[in-house]
Image (tube, helix red, strand yellow):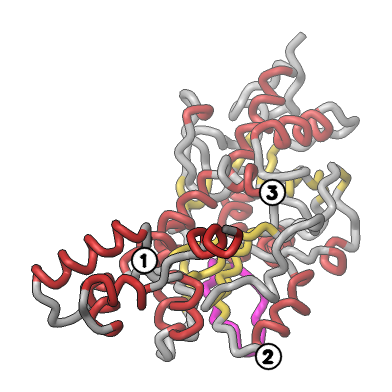
Amino acid sequence: MDGEASATTQRPTLAAVAALAGVSGSTASLAFSGAGPVSDSTRAKVLTAAQTLGYAGPDPRAQSLRRGRSGIIGIVIEERLQDAFRDPMSLAMLDGIADETGNAGAGLLLLSDIGGPQLDIRSAPMDAVILVGCSTRLDESVAVLRQRGMPVVAIEADDMPGVLSISLDNRDATARLARHLLDLGHESVAVVALPLDAAKEQQRLPANWDELATSHTTRDRLRGLRDVYPGFGGIVATRSSIDAGRAAGLELLEGADPPTAVVAQSDLLAMGVIRAAESLGIRVPEELSVVGFDGAQVDAMGSYDLTTVIQPAVEKGRAAGRAAVELVEGGSPTPMAFTSELHIGTTTAARSQPERSRAG
């Protein structure tokens, strides 16, 4: 009885299906894949036999081993996934990646490299990996992936040997925003920066930020501001969100010497700064000019038309997805560099004379 019970609980095989249907194993395999000269009647016999035996189809793990591929492209995001899914720019890039990889029949595996128990990107079952805004903390893992021969595409990262780059003009775009403020007469300018590294605590921007920043995006946007305002200061936010921008804005604007203009490194942070100004009775743009970065369209902006730079987030994602698919197929895609477009809205104005005073 025990032997009979164990026999009945074994997973049915394709060979058993072929035998019941009276066809060869290769014919049964082609009937399941739909990729071969199998008649409709033969396919029907195979599927009927499979249903009788409770056979659900070939084991995808075995198929992957035979092909030497998983059919999966990994996406590494160096932040909590719940934060990424609240960020319109992250979502736009993921949409672009999914458009291209989906057309190629590849699946996506989202990985978050923020520490704690998780799937190690160095051993994850994938055919290629796309790094989205990742810092230099991943250099060692990327080196291991390259040793394995894994194709790697990086969106907004430092140049790395053997890694295909999809870049954005973060430095130049920020400098354009800063020059706009300078042209308006603003001399006291502060930044609300994206996190410098994996640490997620709000802090004053340290003087040696260029040495500390591991995030390529944060560092390049700070460098762009320094190109126009060499002596700026500011706050490092905990993440790209309206709440984090509001907290950083309050610390800036409640200080002894508040700025007349704020450069926020994302549109969500910029909207948070505007919320902080509103709560303090500071009028935007009459008493405080605020600029962002991204070109995000979110309901929280209300009647504000934010001065910002509009980046092609979806196109960046598509370029990364196409490159990853091409690399998996043995191709040689070329790096791509994208540029942002300056949009002057209603949140910036000429510096008021005399210095603004707070209402209330």
Q: Earlier in the sequence, mark 2 or mark 1?
A: 1
Of the image marks 2 and 3, the number of the one nearer the N terminus = 3
Which one is in front, 289 or 309? 309
Q: Nearer the viewer, mark 2 or mark 1?
A: 1
Label 1 element class: loop
Q: Is residue 25 above or below residue 134?
A: below
Residue position marked by numbered label 1 in the rendering: 57
From the viewer's perspective, tell me whether residue 269 is left or right of residue 26. right
Amino acid, disc 1 = Gly
Label ID, residue 80: 3
Query: Which range of residues does the magenta coloring cover?
Result: 156-169
The majority secondary structure of the magenta stretch comes to loop
| Distance of label 2 from label 3 (alpha carbons) | 27 Å
The three-letter amino acid code for the residue at tag 3 is Arg
Q: CA distance from mark 3 to mark 1?
A: 36 Å
Asked whether residue 160 is drawn in magenta, I would say yes
Q: Is residue 318 left or right of residue 129?
A: left
